[in-house]
Structures are given as C-alpha cells and as structure tokens.
Amino acid sequence: MQVRRGVAGMVTGLALAACGGTGYNYVANSDEGAYFKVPDHWTLFDEADILQPREGGLSATDAAALQSRVWLRGFDAAGDPSPENVFTEGSATPRGYAQVLTLTREERDSIDAVALRSSGFPTDPETMRPIDPVKYVEDQPDGAIRLLELDETVVTSGGRHGARVTAYVEGEVPYVFTHTTLVDPTTTRLFIFSLGCNLACWEANQDLLLEIADSWTLEEKS
C-alpha cells in the first residue's frame, strides 16, 4: 500500500462559496477562520442533518445540547449520500467532516498530547478512550493499526496546535483515514478535520483526499 505523505501544517441552509469552473465547493466558518474545499459533486451536511436523535445514538436532549456548541459540516461522495455515512470509516466512497467544538470543563481537562493524536481512532475497550496509536504500534508492531503519517507539531495562526495522523486500520473492512486535531491556546475550542474511506477507495483516490486534507485552513480571527 502506497500512501503519499501529506503536508503537515457537517448542507441545509449552508452558504457555499463556489468558484465557477474550479470543480470545488469552498466551505467556511468565518467566525473561527476555518476553511476547506471538497469536490462540488460531493454532498454536504450541517449539524442539524447529522446530530439527529436516533435509536441507539443521541437522545433528543443530547442532540440539542451538542448542536448548541458545535459547528459541524459533513461530506459524502456516495451516489446515495446520507448523514450516517459521514462517520462510516469503511465507506466505499470518500467521506468525512470538519468540526469546531466548544469544550466543556470536563472535556478541557482531558485534552493532552495523547488525546490529540488519538482522536478518530477506535475505542479501547479497557480504557473506553480512543486507542493511542503510538503506544499501540509500539506494543503491537504487526497489529491492526499502521501509522502512515504522524505530525504532532502542527501549529496554525493564533497558536492553535495539535496533531495530524494518517493511519491504516484493519477490521471487517480495512480503511485509511487522515485526521487533524487542534486545540486553541486557551483549550476552549477543538478543531477537527477528518476524511477517509476503505482501503481500495483510498488507494484509488489518495492524491485527491490528501489535497482536500491539506485545504483545511485555520486563520487567526480578526
């Protein structure tokens, strides 16, 4: 499996800035200085689409509470797109999301270097926290997770900092994802950009997917 090393560094009612002829939609959260692009034939969803109460998922109360403190844009390249597919790691077509989350006090207390690089990984059944990929690879070098890129020195305008991870994960459907997780200097906002798909899809689209990942930009707020 060949994966190019990328550059380190959730739509109802959503206004998209589309540049004619470019083939891309440009999505922005101007309040936070967050921007990214996706191909214009991909479907976009916002937090109202994605954070719906569902059986076995969020309750109506939890969904409303989360919507009040998150900006979320999901995207799905499937011919039959759905908000649920935004988080389907083994999807046969590209999918992902961008998120700006206002952290609770409890969440702020849990943010450290391990949490930043572990974001997006499967939950460890023993700790009930995302698997730390560094420790996992050290303990199980031939295990189900392979790190393809790890940069824990990502810094953007305004001192937002964190990690970018690209990894291969075995499972019922092997998949690859790239995940950038940053926090602001006061640890009050968490910024995430994630996308991926199953292994065959990644290998066929990796240049495009890494270009989209590289488009995630956080500018200093004026």
Image (cartoon, rainbow, N blue to C red):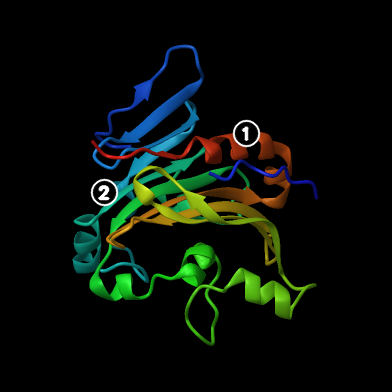
- The residue lying toward the viewer, choosing from 187 and 211, is 187
Q: Quadrant of residue 124?
A: bottom right
Is 157 positioned to the left or the right of 136 in the image? Answer: left
From where the camera sits, is residue 62 visible? yes
Q: Which tag is nearer the camera, tag 1 or tag 2?
A: 1
The residue at which mark 1 appears reads as 208
SS at mark 1 in the image: helix
Q: Residue at x 80, y 50 (%)?
A: 1
Q: Earlier in the sequence, mark 1 or mark 2?
A: 2
From where the camera sits, is residue 10 visible? no
The residue at which mark 2 appears reads as 48
- The residue lying toward the viewer, choosing from 109 and 126, is 109
Picture coordinates of residue 171, whole percent (x, y):
68, 67
Is 180 positioned to the left or the right of 188 in the image? Answer: right
- The residue lying toward the viewer, choosing from 83 and 19, is 19
Quadrant where the C terminus sits is top left
Residue type at mark 1 is: Leu
Picture coordinates of residue 78, whole percent (x, y):
54, 39
Picture coordinates of residue 14, whole percent (x, y):
28, 33
Q: Residue at x 62, y 33 (%)?
A: 208
Q: What is the C-alpha distance between the residues marked 1 and 2? A: 28 Å
Picture coordinates of residue 198, whole percent (x, y):
66, 52
Density class for disc 2 (Cα within 10 Å; few <14, some 14-19, many ≥20) is some
Density class for disc 1 (Cα within 10 Å; few <14, some 14-19, many ≥20) is some
